[in-house]
């Protein structure tokens, strides 16, 4: 089987270096681009993200990627959103101000009840029914956020708990969103990234 | 449950990783990227790299260093501090491989820009570095560039209280590099004014100290610098003595 090509969507926000190295260490070919002709040839798109939701949406629209990503999801192309990238998949976010998201996975992004941050390593309660995630139940991953996904249970594949229980993994068709940073979660993170990529590309 | 963190700190001056003592004496350790790689291999929870001459010399962030570290392909969260004076700097640092930023000079010089940084990067990415001492029951905040201390202004307290930064890196700069000497009064005084989670740093070396600090609900992480260089696998060693604490267990990587 030839190497899979993964495109990191370069919309101006995010730590591309870490994601790139993680993917290359797993043997994938990596493209970092905002050009549709580059993104079109990839087997899977990754939406990375360190940043605030409204600024990210503004940039996606500025680079004409907002509608493009919605279209790719409707064509059932595999997409993985990481942290802010996961939030962008939802219908909307209340971060700073109400902002509409890509609407690829139904749900909204809200603040934690106690207005606290959730930063550090936490245990993932992963769905043991989904073969992509089952081996990662009770493993620890690195989180760095203060907003969380809130949506129908049917899309939730993993949970974490701080002062409240919240979704850490969401999935709809070939689109996955992870709240934590697999690329910064050492061995468990790299293995999960590989499992997710193979899981959605081969689905 | 969210774990408390053990953070490794690498201090860099003139391009070299150094041991720092009381913010005034420095001893070279070697190439920063080698230290960072070791910390990651030892399974530290986060790494702070603080480049202490970038703001002072107005050199901007050390992108060359970030590039070298990015080339290592580390899978440990990285926090960068040094020379960040604009939104553009901050965004580029994140794009160069940092996950979070530790801000110091910019809080002294342009506190209002922190709000804009939060708009761009999210507050979770922002940490305020606050080297502190105290005198007559008052906390004194060090501007490390001119070595002058001042009381923390209400504006700065207000900025922190708005929640636009996620954590405060509280540094006992006078005791930095001294064994077992972190002054708990500093955190106790600061806690009276803010409820932002604290990362404590400076003079923390002994397991009993760590026990006590981790027991404090206001402390989210303990950062250690010099003392990690006095032996191999210090991260695992510390963690193995702290198994009763809410820390991620020590991990051992296959290095072959």
Image (cartoon, coloured by chain):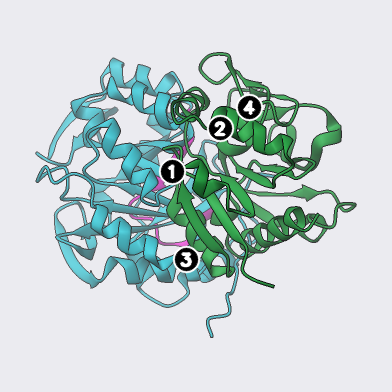
Which chain corresponds to the colour cyan?
B
Residue B208 seen by the camera: no
Earlier sequence position, callout 3 versus callout 1: 3
Q: Nearer the viewer, residue B182 or A114?
A: A114
Q: Is residue B40 above or below residue B212?
A: below
Q: CA distance from mark 2 to mark 4?
A: 24 Å
Q: Residue furthest bottom?
A: B256
Residue at mark 1: B199
Q: CA distance from mark 1 to mark 4?
A: 36 Å
Q: Are marks 2 and 1 on the same chain?
A: no
Task: Judge depth for marks 2 and 1 and give the one in front.
Answer: 2
Q: Tag on residue A102?
A: 4
Is residue A57 in the magenta section? no
Residue A182 placement, left or right of A107: left
Residue B153 placement, left or right of A107: left
Q: Quadrant of the C terminus of chain B?
A: bottom right
Could you say whether the residue bearing mark 2 is in a helix, strand or loop?
loop
Q: Colour of chain A?
A: green
Earlier sequence position, callout 2 versus callout 4: 4
Q: Is residue A93 above or below residue B215?
A: above
Answer yes or no: do the residues labelled 3 and 1 have beta carbons within 8 Å? no
Q: Tag on residue A117?
A: 2
> Which span of residues is magenta-colored?
B196-211
Q: Are marks 2 and 3 on the same chain?
A: no
Q: Pointer 4 indicates a residue of which chain?
A: A
Could you say whether the residue bearing mark 4 is in a helix, strand or loop?
loop
Q: Are marks 3 and 1 on the same chain?
A: yes
Q: Are marks 4 and 3 on the same chain?
A: no
Q: Pointer 1 indicates a residue of which chain?
A: B
Q: CA distance from mark 2 to mark 3?
A: 24 Å
Task: Judge depth for marks 4 and 3 and give the one in front.
Answer: 4
């Amino acid at each position: 089987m030839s190497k899979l090509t993964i495109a990191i969507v370069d919309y101006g926000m995010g730590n591309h270096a870490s994601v790139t190295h993680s993917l290359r260490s797993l043997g994938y070919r990596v493209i970092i681009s905002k050009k549709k002709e580059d993104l079109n040839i990839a087997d899977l798109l990754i939406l990375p993200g360190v940043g605030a939701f409204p600024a990210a949406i503004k940039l996606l629209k500025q680079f004409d990627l907002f509608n493009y990503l919605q279209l790719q999801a409707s064509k059932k192309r595999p997409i993985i959103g990481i942290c802010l990238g996961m939030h962008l998949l939802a219908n909307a976010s209340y971060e700073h101000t109400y902002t509409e998201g890509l609407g690829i996975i139904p749900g909204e992004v809200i603040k934690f009840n106690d207005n606290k941050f959730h930063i550090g390593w936490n245990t993932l309660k992963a769905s043991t029914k989904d073969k992509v995630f089952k081996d990662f139940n009770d493993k620890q991953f690195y989180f760095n956020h203060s907003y969380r996904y809130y949506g129908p249970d049917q899309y939730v594949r993993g949970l974490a708990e701080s002062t409240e229980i919240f979704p850490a993994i969401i999935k709809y068709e070939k689109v996955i969103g992870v709240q934590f940073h697999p690329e910064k979660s050492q061995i468990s993170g790299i293995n999960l990234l590989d499992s997710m990529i193979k899981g959605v590309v081969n689905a | 449950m969210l774990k408390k963190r053990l953070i490794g700190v690498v201090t860099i001056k003139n391009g070299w990783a150094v041991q720092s003592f009381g913010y005034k004496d420095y001893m070279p350790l070697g190439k920063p990227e080698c230290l960072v790689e070791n910390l990651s291999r030892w399974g530290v929870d986060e790494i702070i790299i603080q480049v202490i001459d970038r703001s002072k010399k107005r050199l901007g962030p050390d992108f060359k260093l970030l590039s070298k570290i990015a080339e290592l392909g580390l899978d440990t969260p990285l926090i960068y501090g040094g020379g960040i004076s604009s939104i553009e700097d901050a965004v580029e640092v994140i794009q160069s491989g940092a996950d979070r930023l530790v801000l110091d000079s910019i809080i002294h010089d342009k506190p209002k820009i922190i709000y804009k940084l939060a708009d761009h990067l999210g507050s979770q990415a922002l940490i305020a570095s606050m080297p502190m001492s105290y005198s007559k029951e008052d906390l004194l905040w060090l501007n490390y560039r001119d070595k002058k201390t001042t009381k923390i202004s209400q504006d700065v307290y207000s900025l922190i209280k708005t929640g636009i930064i996620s954590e405060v890196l509280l540094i006992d700069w006078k005791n930095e590099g001294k064994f077992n000497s972190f002054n708990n009064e500093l955190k106790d005084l600061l806690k009276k004014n803010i409820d932002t989670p604290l990362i404590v740093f400076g003079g923390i070396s002994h397991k009993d100290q760590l026990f006590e600090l981790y027991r404090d609900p206001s402390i989210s992480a303990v950062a250690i610098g010099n003392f990690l260089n006095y032996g191999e696998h210090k991260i695992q060693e510390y963690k193995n003595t702290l198994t009763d604490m809410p820390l991620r267990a020590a991990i051992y990587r296959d290095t072959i």
